[in-house]
Image (cartoon, helix red, strand yellow):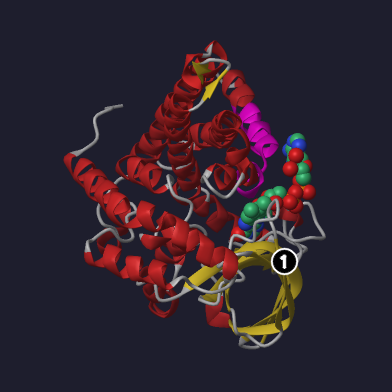
Amino acid sequence: MNFEYSKQSLELQNKLDDFMQKHIFNNEKEILEFRLDNPWKHSPKLEELKNLAKKEGLWNLFLPRGYGELSPGLTNLEYAPLAELMGRCSFSSEIFNCSAPDTGNMEVLAKYGTDEQKNKWLKPLMNGEIRSAFLMTEPEVASSDATNIKTSIVKENDEYVINGRKWWSSGGMNPSTKIYVLMGKTDPTASRHVQQSMILVPADSPGITIVRPLSVFGYLDSPEGHAEIELKNVRVPKENMILGEGRGFEIAQGRLGPGRIHHCMRLIGAAQRSLNLMCKRVNERETFGKKLKDYSSIRQDIAKSACEIEQGRLLTLAAADKIDRFGAKVGANLIAMIKIAIPQMACNVVDRAIQAFGGMGVSQDTPLASFYVYARAIRLADGPDEVHMYQLGRNLVKEQLTK
Ligand SMILES: Cc1cc2nc3c(=O)[nH]c(=O)nc-3n(C[C@H](O)[C@H](O)[C@H](O)COP(=O)(O)OP(=O)(O)OC[C@H]3O[C@@H](n4cnc5c(N)ncnc54)[C@H](O)[C@@H]3O)c2cc1C
């Protein structure tokens, strides 16, 4: 693997950093306060910045080269440092139309959608005119094993009828969310991995009730939010099926590739900014006659954090490089490794920074508290740590047995 970034990636890194310095960090407080005071409304400032980012060509950077004219032409390896830069601010990836769950949903539509599905849903998503949600997890079943998902999708003439209850549908509270990618069962009698399908469900379909927003350690993550959603006899045209009945797992495998390592890339940015803030803070404060930076325990925390961030960064780049060169299937072990290692690393690094900040660290006056909540939630949201370990362990044993 070549550790040098390409010219295109370096140019975009400079441009993106410049944009963030000029327009994002100095508006961060205002945008976050607006969100706290106006849940489920869009900050006008954020919308303004989206238009500016689009004009400057900092838009849809996530879609890798293989997607032809839909892609800005970057590989995953080239995109990784850009996502890291975005990760330094909790909402900035949305400004560049590079935020979850839309990135994963756009990838699904770009990869598996029909022309009609692409025209109707992918185009406005890529233009940033609408947002989307991914509806898999259900309150009634252990959803870390997706074969348990039991929402029913039944064909009736030219329509599918959907019944079930979903929760943790990120983006589900957002007034701009117009389309759901829903996973459910079309054939409960089929073999385990072909029972499920993915289907497009317009958010305004009759029979849909947004039951409530779920909070994450008290954060509503507005305006996207995480919704509990009830679907009662929801009817959609048969053309809304993605790829075909029974192919939900096949799509999920595709969705688990590049789109799902973006959280890891962003978390490295969150961890790096936390460390940078920590270094500045410990130079400012003094206790018992000396600066915090001169305590051995503080220096150890800084040194450990720097090592862990760099290890995580290199592992993430290795995973991105493997996906680029050999595909997500061959990269599966490295993908699992970063999903196990990076959110935990970010939790540890942010936690040390919080401690060094004292009481301020858990308040709204630094981004640290929200970074911690993000990193901790990703240990579940991107699939629980244990599930990635379960699969990685199985693969590694299997590899040895077949050698
Ligand atoms: C902030 C946030 C955002 C989310 N966004 C979305 C979204 O947009 N769309 C969506 O569909 N879902 C979303 N989720 C849901 C998330 O994907 C699920 O919470 C996750 O898959 C776990 O499913 P579960 O909650 O049903 O936990 P369960 O399946 O009940 O698992 C509970 C625990 O059991 C343990 N466990 C499970 N399997 C194993 C194993 N093999 N070995 C050892 N221990 C194991 C783990 O500790 C696990 O955490 C989000 C979750 C959060 C917190």
Task: Report which quarter residue 250 is drawn in.
Answer: bottom right
Residue 145 can be seen in this image:
no
Q: Quadrant of the N terminus?
A: top left
Between 5 and 304, the residue placed more toward the observer is 304
**Dot 1, crowdedness within 10 Å: few (<14), some or many (≥20)?**
many
Q: Residue at x 38, y 61 (%)?
A: 95
Q: Residue at x 62, y 25 (%)?
A: 398
Number of marks drawn: 1
x and y, in percent, of residue 27 in the image: 39, 58
Task: Determine the residue located farthest toward the right in the rendered image.
Answer: 140
> Is residue 389 positioned above or below 141 on the image?
above
The response on whether ligand 1 sits within 8 Å of label 1 is yes
Left or right? Give the position of 58 relative to 251: left
- Please tell me whether residue 342 belongs to the stretch shown in magenta: no
> Is residue 138 positioned above or below 390 on the image?
below
x and y, in percent, of residue 232 in the image: 76, 81
> Is residue 358 positioned above or below 132 on the image?
above
Task: Determine the residue located farthest toward the front in the rendered image.
Answer: 289
Which is the main secondary structure of the residues drawn in magenta?
helix
- Please tell me whether residue 385 belongs to the stretch shown in magenta: yes
Q: Residue at x 51, y 46 (%)?
A: 367
Q: Quadrant of the C terminus?
A: top right
Left or right? Give the position of 73 relative to 387: left
Q: Which residue is mark 1?
A: 166
Type of amino acid at the residue the image marks with label 1: Lys
Left or right? Give the position of 41 relative to 140: left
x and y, in percent, of residue 275 in the image: 46, 31
User: In the structure shown, which secondary structural element does the residue marked by tag 1 occupy?
Assistant: strand
Between 132 and 57, the residue placed more toward the observer is 57
Q: Residue at x 58, y 72 (%)?
A: 40
Give the residues in magenta: 378-395
